[in-house]
């Protein structure tokens, strides 16, 4: 468990996960999961990653720039984005944030994300029950840190649960 900015801008607990070839070919699979607390304001920006990112702001505030729009985020807010598009996220200076996150992918994710957006899903939103998302992220991080011989299947199950919650939150006819 490490952090790119460990000790400089953030304090974090993260796992960069290497799924099996079977998982990469057949399942929703985890790429990275973790939690962080900002120690000072910072911005992270990326693009062209074959990954989908979900994160929950657990404390503090920050912002997301995605698809040409800026979103103000505060504790309890969630983000779900396609990381092939450029994005930037950053903690506020006045109210440093804490996050829980997961980067994941799978051959079905493009269609799932399109359906999420089609149903009214937004890149940033405030869920009815943030604790459900926090619990799933905690489970993903815990499973990824085990040597369980079926952990790829367990991770797939939790990612499916996460996507189910996201679809339930996305319905905005």
Image (spheres, grey):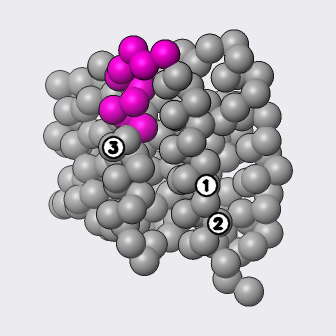
Label 2: state its secondary structure. Answer: helix
Question: In the displayed structure, does residue 63 sit left or right of residue 47?
Answer: left
Image quarter of residue 69: bottom right
**Residue 80 rendering spot, x and y as whole percentages:** 57, 55
Is 141 included in the stretch rendered in magenta?
yes
Q: Residue furthest front?
A: 149
Asked whether 12 or 164 is in front, the reply is 164
Q: Residue at x 33, y 32 (%)?
A: 142
User: Which disc is residue 138 wearing?
Assistant: 3
Asked whether the beta carbons under mark 1 and mark 3 sit within 8 Å of each other, the answer is no
The numbered mark, 1 or 3, whose residue comes first in the sequence reads: 3
Asked whether 62 or 19 is in front, the reply is 19
Residue holding disc 2: 167
Residue holding disc 1: 163
Label 1: state its secondary structure. Answer: helix
Q: Residue at x 23, y 60 (%)?
A: 60
Counting other residues with Cα less than 10 Å from the Cα at mark 3, is it few (<14), some (14-19), or many (20 or more)? some
Q: Which residues are magenta?
A: 140-149
Asked whether 161 or 111 is in front, the reply is 161
Question: In the displayed structure, does residue 79 sit left or right of residue 74?
Answer: right
Asked whether the beta carbons under mark 2 and mark 1 sit within 8 Å of each other, the answer is yes
**Residue 118 rendering spot, x and y as whole percentages:** 79, 69
Counting other residues with Cα less than 10 Å from the Cα at mark 2, is it few (<14), some (14-19), or many (20 or more)? some
Q: Is residue 104 above or below residue 148?
A: below
The numbered mark, 3 or 2, whose residue comes first in the sequence reads: 3
Q: In the picture, which quadrant includes the N terminus?
A: top left
| Figure label count | 3
**Residue 14 rendering spot, x and y as whole percentages:** 34, 28
Q: In the picture, which quadrant includes the C terminus?
A: bottom right
Alpha carbon distance from label 3 to label 2: 20 Å
């Amino acid at each position: 468990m490490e952090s790119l900015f460990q000790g400089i801008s953030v304090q974090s607990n993260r796992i960069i996960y290497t799924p099996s070839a079977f998982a990469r070919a057949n399942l929703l699979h985890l790429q990275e999961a973790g939690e962080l607390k900002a120690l000072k304001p910072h911005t992270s920006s990326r693009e062209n990653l074959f990954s989908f990112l979900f994160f929950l702001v657990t404390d503090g505030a920050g912002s997301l720039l995605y698809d040409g729009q800026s979103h103000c985020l505060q504790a309890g807010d969630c983000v779900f984005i396609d990381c092939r598009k450029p994005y930037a996220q950053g903690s506020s200076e006045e109210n440093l944030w804490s996050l829980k996150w997961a980067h994941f992918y799978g051959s079905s994710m493009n269609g799932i994300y399109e359906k999420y957006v089609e149903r009214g899903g937004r890149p940033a939103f405030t869920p009815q029950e943030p604790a459900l998302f926090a619990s799933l992220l905690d489970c993903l991080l815990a499973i990824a840190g085990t040597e369980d011989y079926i952990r790829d299947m367990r991770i797939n199950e939790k990612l499916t649960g996460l996507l189910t919650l996201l679809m339930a939150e996305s319905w905005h006819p």
